Image (cartoon, grey):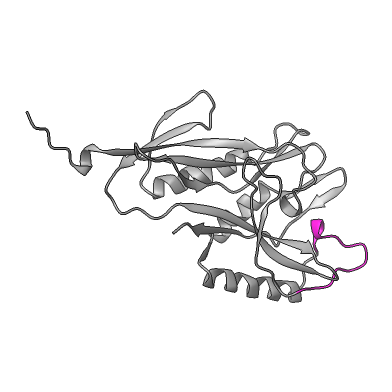
Amino acid sequence: MRVNVSSDDRWETCRIYRHVFEYSPGITGVLMSLPMSSVGYFWAEGGGPDRVDLIGESVPFRIWQNPPQYSGESIAYTFLRKRLVENGWDPTTTGTSWWETHFRRRAGTDYPPPWQIWVTDSKWGKRDSYFAAYHVPQRQDTKPIEHGRSAEFHLAFLESCRALRENDERHRILDSFLRVLREEGFESIDVADNEALRQGLADVTVRSIRLDCWCNRFLLRRKQ
């Protein structure tokens, strides 16, 4: 007996994973480790029977130990799950952890490429500061990947990149840098979504330190 198998009978599968970094002084900027907090992210991995690939990433999130109920995890997870569904993945089952969702989609269809998530942040230069795009460290690494560099700007006395003040000049520099990134293939995330995601990572006060990172823009970059 001969059995014909069409693409409608074949499925790709993937699942969501989670990683939280231990304290590491090598993680800087918006991804830096702060007292009583940890930074992590979700990603989806899977594919066909003969390969395992990155499917997509969430934005990074921060977990605060005090208050224990504050966490950006659910915001980051929802972002990744929504993107997966938009890219043809259907949730099927959940593993032992609430975030360990499994998905499947039919093989043989032309789906959008996998994606990485980058975030813009400010950083000290040798003399002045600048904006750059950062990709969260991978599991075995401690330092984020830095991409690009904006024009430089001067920090005022006692001002830090951790709580960068807004002004027209800095907005112009950031907007110009974002245009360059978009020309390189980075995709901007919806403004309302960006605000919610930013709050899940950095918009908080801890030990009198105000993290109000207005310059954080989350960017999606497709892997070709």
Q: Is residue 154 left or right of residue 97?
A: right
Residue 28, placed above or below residue 217 = above
Q: Is residue 213 left or right of residue 208?
A: left
Residue 97, placed above or below residue 44 = above
The furthest residue to the left: 1
Q: Measured from the top left, where is residue 145 in percent x and y?
A: 65, 55
User: Residue at 73% across / 53% down in the picture?
Assistant: 30
Quadrant housing residue 61: top right
Q: What are the residue bounds of the magenta stretch?
A: 152-164
Q: Measured from the top left, where is residue 170 in percent x and y?
A: 74, 72
The furthest residue to the front: 50
Q: Is residue 169 left or right of residue 61?
A: right
| Frontmost residue, 58 versus 27 | 27
User: Residue at 40% across / 45% down in the picture?
Assistant: 85
The furthest residue to the right: 157
Q: Quadrant of the C terminus?
A: bottom left
| Frontmost residue, 76 versus 116 | 116
Residue 216, placed above or below residue 209 = below
User: Residue at 57% across / 57% down in the picture?
Assistant: 192
Quadrant housing residue 147: bottom right
Residue 147, placed above or below residue 52 = below
Magenta region includes residue 36: no
User: Residue at 56% across / 41% down in the picture?
Assistant: 42
Prevailing secondary structure class for the magenta stretch in the rendered image = loop
Q: Quadrant of the N terminus?
A: top left
Q: Measured from the top left, where is residue 55 in percent x and y?
A: 45, 46
